[in-house]
Structures are given as structure tokens and as C-alpha cells.
Amino acid sequence: MTARDVLSPLMVPADEMAGLRIIDGDMPLVDVLPRLLDSGSHSLAVADGDVTLGVITETSLLEGLGRMIAPRDDSSVITLECRPEDYSASMLAHAVENTDSHLVDFWSVPAADGMLRVTLRVRCSDPSAAVRSLERYDFRVVEASGSMVRDAEIASERLLALQTLLNV
């Protein structure tokens, strides 16, 4: 997606638009976000050459980013950490696909301790096979959740409650 894909539907008066920082309409959203955060007004004017196309606001950018992330009910979420020099998107995909699961998408952010934190969305209801595969590739999994994991936790709690009742 580019800047022109997330223009605000709100009309901005010409005198207010004159004071805004101008960006190119073909700028990728990844580059738009830091510029928007750095602008004092939290708005950017978008232009195509000499023609002003409109304005990007925080709300319009957030809505555009939200459209980039497809909702999926059949996915699990796995969060792992690794050293930046050990990070490889192809290795992550390979580790996940070794379990006959599909990598839907992933995000990476630097962690406070110099590590890289990667969040994966994997198309499977039980992430345990993908977790084991990622750990075989020396990635440290810090969190995993999926519908099967939640169901297993609930079942475990119910069994413990039943066992407590039977021991009374």
C-alpha cells in the first residue's frame, strides 16, 4: 500500500493544508508512518507531482494498516525471540511449513535486550507442531496460542477440578 491508498475522507481547508508536510503519493506506508508521527499536526499532505491529492491523518493511516491485516479465525499466533544475526524469514517459513502449516504473516520488532522479537501467524488451530519445529531451528519460542491450546488448557483445568472433587 502507498500513501494515496490511505487518504482521509475528511476535507481539509486549503489554508490548513498549506502548512502540512508534503509527501509523494507513491510513498510506501512503512515510510509514511514515521513521518506522520514526526509531524506536529499528525497530518501529512499527499501530492502527485504538483497536484495535491489529499491528506493522511492518524485515523486514515490506522484504517489502511488495518486493511493490510486479514482477519483469520483458523490461525495460531507464535511469538519467538532470536539474535538479529540469526533471523531469517525463509528459515522461519521453512520451519513452519515443515509441519504442513502455512505462514500467514509475521512482524518483527527489536526487543529491549538486543534480541529480535518475531510474531508469526500460522494457519493451524494447534501451534504445538510449529513450535517444536521452530525450536529445532534454535528459535526460542516465548508464547504460542491457538484454539486447540486454549481448549487444552480449559480441559486441563476441568480435569483438575474433577480430581479435586473426587478426592473430597
Image: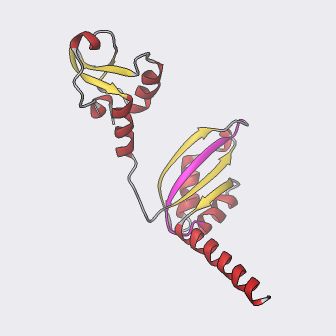
Name the spot of residue 2 as percent of width and height, x first: 33, 32
Name the residue nearer the viewer: 15 or 75. Answer: 15
The quadrant of the picture occupied by the C terminus is bottom right
Looking at the image, is 95 positioned above or below residue 90?
A: below
Query: Left of 59 or right of it: where is 5?
Result: left
Is 33 inside the magenta-drawn segment? no
Name the residue nearer the viewer: 158 or 1. Answer: 158
Name the residue nearer the viewer: 29 or 100. Answer: 29
Count of numbered labels shown in the rendering: 0
Q: Give the range drawn in magenta.
A: 114-127
Residue in the picture at 68% in, 54% down? 142
Looking at the image, is 123 positioned above or below residue 33?
A: below
Name the spot of residue 118 as percent of width and height, x first: 59, 47
Residue 28 sits in quarter: top left
Name the spot of residue 31 as percent of width and height, x first: 43, 27
Looking at the image, is 64 positioned above or below residue 13?
A: below
Name the spot of residue 71 as percent of width and height, x first: 39, 55
The quadrant of the picture occupied by the N terminus is top left
Is 122 inside the magenta-drawn segment? yes
Residue in the picture at 62% in, 68% down? 128
Residue in the picture at 61% in, 68% down? 129
Residue in the picture at 64% in, 71% down? 153
Looking at the image, is 84 positioned above or below residue 157?
A: above
Query: Left of 69 or right of it: where is 112?
Result: right
